[in-house]
């Protein structure tokens, strides 16, 4: 089979990888001419003579047809054959392909490469910029996680250019930026990632994406060491002087010290609270191993051991129930919130669930937290601000009922339309 042309770039660059993947799916030969921006290959006179903009990747067809911009090249190669239906099977799936290609570049690739360049100090490091782009990645992966809960691929029931685009970006993210703790927060996305990279048509292209070569930890910025100051010329040896007791070291300016001292890890606000008679680890064991209600139950143990001075009880409701649509997506949202409470794992016990049905639902959770502030414990989750937190008083029957029912995953709450919404037994339920 004759080649359709040449693509200038590198196989590890996502915008080039998707083109190579599309060619493989369509059974087309395309020659990769290794051209690295990091090595300045795209600035060389012979390259600029042919491609004056110096952009990568760039395509040159066997008929001398030229294209730049990875998205355009991928669409061209994907459309050269209709056998694999990479551009969709009808107008709707075609539109979904376009949507996810744009989303993959704007919402995954852009923050991924921003974090990478910042932490490698290729662009001047800025902590606020790094945090902003990590937050953008988490928001994007949570959206992808919800979408993939009941889907195998992004646009229909087969691999399309949408999948090749998004997964090419995820390969770079998972190999170079995001470690196992980050990846573990998005199991549906990881399952989808593994499904696509192991497709027979592209497995050899993505073989470097196997688990053993994915990032072992999140990428981190390491400040460059200070340059050593020039040593002064040796002076004549002074006359011997009486020995003095050594002074305490006031400052250590050794050259092997980093330019900025590492900041001590901030202690959790609950770490300094006075002792309490209730052991939360024991409470978690009781909650896991006993029935929640009834004789010899968790709640019986809890009411006998609860320390209202050392702990407080809280109800959290999602503030925007009108935005909730599918119940499974709401359940995924709760799961993500519970995952992001990990930093407070030693100080919180709680349960949450979806109440109601599709397009008429609400999210409610009940928590036992150390201390008297929900913010100190639940505020470690960035999306805590999307929930209203109300302190519960066990002397009030309605508060006690909500607390006990929610921990037992039963009961009902008032919905956004004023009606009673029963706990949805078909939705996932969560505990921490």
Image (cartoon, grey):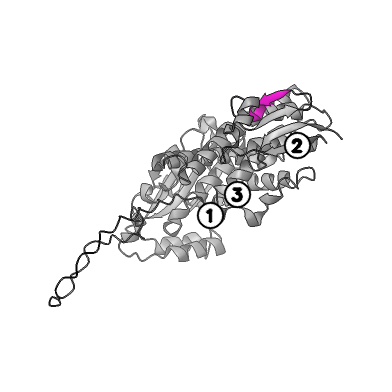
Which one is in front, 313 or 304?
Answer: 313
Q: Quadrant of residue 54?
A: top right
Q: Horizontally, is 296 left or right of 250 in the view?
A: right
Q: Which mark identifies residue 15?
A: none
Which one is in front, 132 or 285?
Answer: 132
N-term mark: 3 or 1 = 3
Q: Is residue 86 magenta?
A: no
Q: Are marks 1 and 2 in contact (CB under 8 Å)?
A: no
Q: Which residue is mark 2?
A: 31
Q: Are marks 3 and 1 in contact (CB under 8 Å)?
A: no
Q: Horizontally, is 242 left or right of 352 in the view?
A: left
Q: Secondary structure at mark 1?
A: loop
What crowding class fits label 1: few (fewer than 14 Cα within 10 Å), some (14-19), or many (20 or more)? some
Q: Horizontally, is 214 left or right of 395 in the view?
A: right
Q: Which residues are magenta?
A: 65-72
Mark 1–mark 2 distance (CA, rounded to whole Å): 34 Å
Residue drawn at (56%, 60%), measured in percent from left and top? 291
Q: Quadrant of residue 52?
A: top right
Image x and y of residue 177, in percent:
54, 47
Q: Which residue is mark 3?
A: 175
Q: Secondary structure at mark 2?
A: strand
């Amino acid at each position: 089979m004759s080649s359709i042309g040449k693509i200038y770039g590198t196989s590890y660059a996502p915008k080039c990888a998707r083109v190579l993947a599309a060619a493989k799916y369509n059974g087309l030969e395309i020659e990769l001419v290794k051209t690295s921006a990091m090595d300045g290959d795209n600035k060389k006179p012979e390259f600029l003579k042919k491609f004056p903009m110096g952009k990568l990747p760039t395509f040159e067809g066997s008929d001398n047809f030229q294209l730049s911009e990875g998205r355009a090249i991928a669409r061209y190669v994907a459309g050269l054959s209709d056998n694999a239906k990479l551009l969709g099977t009808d107008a709707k799936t075609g539109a979904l392909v376009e949507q996810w290609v744009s989303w993959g570049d704007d919402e995954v690739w852009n923050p991924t490469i921003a974090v990478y360049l910042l932490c490698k100090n290729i662009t001047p490091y800025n902590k606020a910029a790094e945090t902003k782009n990590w937050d953008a990645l988490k928001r994007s992966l949570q959206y992808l996680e919800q979408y993939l809960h009941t889907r195998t691929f992004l646009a229909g029931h087969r691999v399309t250019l949408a999948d090749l685009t998004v997964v090419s970006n995820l390969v770079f993210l998972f190999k170079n930026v995001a470690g196992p703790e980050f990846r573990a927060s998005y199991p549906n996305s990881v399952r989808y990632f593994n499904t696509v990279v192991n497709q027979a048509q592209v497995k050899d292209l993505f073989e470097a994406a196997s688990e053993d070569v994915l990032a072992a930890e999140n990428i981190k910025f390491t400040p460059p060491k200070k340059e050593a100051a020039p040593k002064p010329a040796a002076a004549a040896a002074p006359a011997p002087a009486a020995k003095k007791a050594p002074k305490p070291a006031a400052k250590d300016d050794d050259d092997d010290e980093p330019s900025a001292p590492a900041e001590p890890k901030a202690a959790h606000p609950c770490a300094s609270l006075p002792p309490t008679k209730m052991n939360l680890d024991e409470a978690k064991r009781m909650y896991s191993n006993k029935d929640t209600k009834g004789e010899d139950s968790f709640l019986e143990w809890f009411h006998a051991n609860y320390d209202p001075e050392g702990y407080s009880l809280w109800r959290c409701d999602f503030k925007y129930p009108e935005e909730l649509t599918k119940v499974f997506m709401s359940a995924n949202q709760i799961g993500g919130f519970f995952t992001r409470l990990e930093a407070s794992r030693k100080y919180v016990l709680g349960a949450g669930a979806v109440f109601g049905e599709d397009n008429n639902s609400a999210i409610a959770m009940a928590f036992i937290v150390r201390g008297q502030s929900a913010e100190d414990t639940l505020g470690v989750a960035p999306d805590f601000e999307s929930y209203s937190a109300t302190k519960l008083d066990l002397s009030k029957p309605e508060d006690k009922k909500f607390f006990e029912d929610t921990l037992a995953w039963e009961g009902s709450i008032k919905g956004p339309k004023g009606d009673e919404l029963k706990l949805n037994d078909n939705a996932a339920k969560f505990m921490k």
